[in-house]
Image (cartoon, helix red, strand yellow):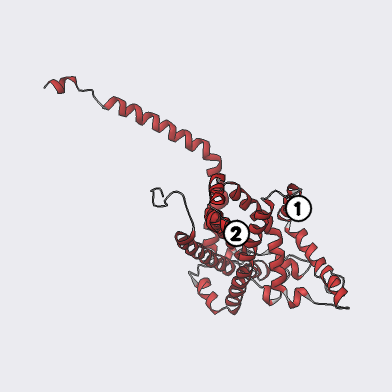
Amino acid sequence: MTFAATSVPRATPRRRFQGRAWRETVSFYLFISPWLLGFLALSVVPLALGFAASLTNYDGYNLDSLRFRGFDNYLRAFDDPDVLHSLWRTFVFSVMNVPLSIGLALFLAILLNGAIPARGVFRTLFYLPHIVPIVAVVWIWRIFVDQNYGLVNGILSWFWPDTAIRWTVDFPTQVLTALTVWTGIGGGMVIFLAGLQGVPNELKDAARIDGATTPQLYRAVIIPLLTPVIFFELVLTMIRSLQTLVAPMLLAGDQLASIPVRDNYLFLVHAYQQVFAQQRYGYGLALIWMFLVVIVALTYAVFKTSKYWVYYEVDQDGGSR
């Protein structure tokens, strides 16, 4: 009875807490409302309209005769030989581009993380192609690899006179890969530089005191600690490679809608041709949605492998290592 007489009612503090939590929730949504409205208007609504259009016979002009076709556009893709070809060429290009981009960016970051003269100048020079517009980059590369007056054939002519290799015709995927690596290596280098500078000096000093050589230091200490950054760069580079669209078309001609040679006929190029050149909006949008599923599946597969080779200081299941 004494306890019942002296106990403090809990209803008042709980109501006070609920009122404060409610005000904080309302304030949070008010602050993010500009971004939230923009996300809904510029991302969610266009995606929903695009998916809806992929289920119809929409060609850009036939609003008066629009018909619902269900998943016919999706099933039609399985009878399109260009779908399989472009998908295969996209994977070939990505397999060439991803390891080269990551490997060279990591190599440059390790090189420019050391105490070398004018390393700030070199960092800037290697990063510059990353911020140059893709149209300008492609025009520069077309000058490099031109059959008649290109820089590459000019250099080769010093050793083999009258060299006139048609680089964009005979080696189109190699040219596209080199161009993509050249433009993307600067961004990857900056990310790896940030990762390298985050490795604790105490661990490096302890390894050196234990007699570790420089290769052993990188193999046993620095690279394992850098695996989260490598994983992050792997996911970004893979998605960028799969989404390559403008460069192969600009390499093929002076216009954006130029059709690339067959080796550079990537999946998004095929979807672009269906939507804007063939006026098959419904079918082209269905291809894009199918490709989105492929990208999500590949990204999920990469995430699933991360537990075998990515080192985290904090256990991803919630504990600490």
Q: Name which residue type carries label 2.
A: Pro
Q: Marks 1 and 2, how far apart in space?
A: 27 Å
Q: Name which residue type carries label 1.
A: Leu
244 above or below 30? below
Find residue 155 and report its image quarter.
bottom right
Q: Which circle's residue, 1 or 2, is located before the other in the chain?
A: 1
- Could you tell me which secondary element the residue under label 1 belongs to? helix
Left or right position of 281 against 11: right
Name the residue carrying label 1.
125
Q: Can residue 229 be seen at all in this image of the molecule?
A: no
Which residue is found at the position 75% from the left and 52% from the top? 122
Left or right position of 293 against 193: left
- Where residue 204 appears, x then y in whole percent? 56, 49
Which residue is found at the position 64% from the left and 65% from the top? 100
Find residue 257 and report its image quarter.
bottom right
Q: Which mark is residue 215?
A: 2
